[in-house]
Amino acid sequence: MKASTTLAVLAAAGAQAHYTFPGTKYNGVAQPQWDTVRITQNHYSNGPVTDVNSALMTCYERDPGVGAPNTLPVTAGSTVTFQVGSSVGHPGPLHFYMAKVPAGKTAKTFDGKGAVWFKIYQDGPSGLGTGSLKWPSDGKTEVSVQIPSCIANGEYLLRVEHIALHSAGSVGGAQLYLSCAQISVTGGSGTLNTGQLVSFPGAYKATDPGILFQLYWPTPTSYINPGPAPVRC
């Protein structure tokens, strides 16, 4: 099969595999959908954000200013899971960001705007240079992240983001699937250096090499995640 035909078939198949991150799970207990996660514009369509300069890049909210009904209490150093509706159906990297709620706001009322976000996790593919890339999140029905043990206590937005790269060979082709959970952290040491804080929109450009990316041909030999490096304790 010619490369151009392969790409067309893969792109068509990809349109059927959209997804959301509608709920959290903590200590084995799944929360109801859209209970601790802000309801997203794609909660019915499952469609992505494709413009990295869109205001939807913050939390993809359907109802900005409303927030989720509840905030999830978590312990620093523990793991928070996002449920996927229905599974991660496209290849690409998974990222998690956090933003500390400022004084005078709560996780429910904080809009997440401005340079407030720091990255706590990113992954990348195996099989670079082989023509058969594998991503850790492929097909997952849940994705999880460990909250840094050295984080400061308080309320945060926890933003999950998956970048689908199956159509990312042209500007605007990358598909971003994301949502924000509201969490309240206790037990942290408060020693974390959050480093470079970024904004959404603003953290990415449409031409960043991790956004504009030829997934299939020519065979990729490297991948550079967009945004800052993840923080470490």
Image (spheres, helix red, strand yellow):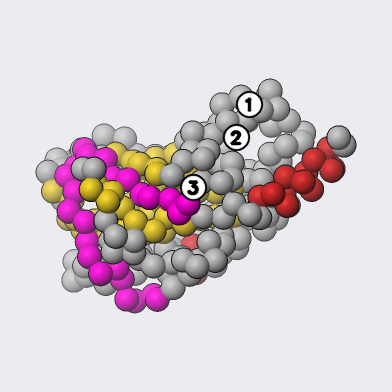
**Residue type at numbered disc 1:** Leu
Secondary structure under badge 1?
loop
Q: Is residue 45 left or right of residue 25?
A: right
Span colored in magenta: 63-86
**Mark 1 in CB contact with mark 2 (< 8 angstroms):** yes
Residue 36: x and y in percent read 28, 61
Mark 1 vs mark 3, CA separation in Å: 24 Å
**Label number found at residue 118:** none
Considering only order in the chain, which callout, 3 or 1, is on the residue closer to the N terminus? 3
Relative to 192, say whether 65 is above or below.
below
Label 3 crowd bin: few (<14), some (14–19), many (20+), radius 10 Å? some
Considering only order in the chain, which callout, 2 or 1, is on the residue closer to the N terminus? 1
| Residue positioned 34% across, 76% down in the render | 65
51 and 191: which one is in front? 51
Give the foreground label among 2 and 3: 3
Residue 133: x and y in percent read 62, 30
| Residue positioned 87% across, 37% down in the render | 2
**Residue type at numbered disc 2:** Tyr
**Label number found at residue 223:** 2
Mark 1 vs mark 2, CA separation in Å: 8 Å
**Label number found at residue 128:** 1
Relative to 214, say whether 71 is above or below.
below
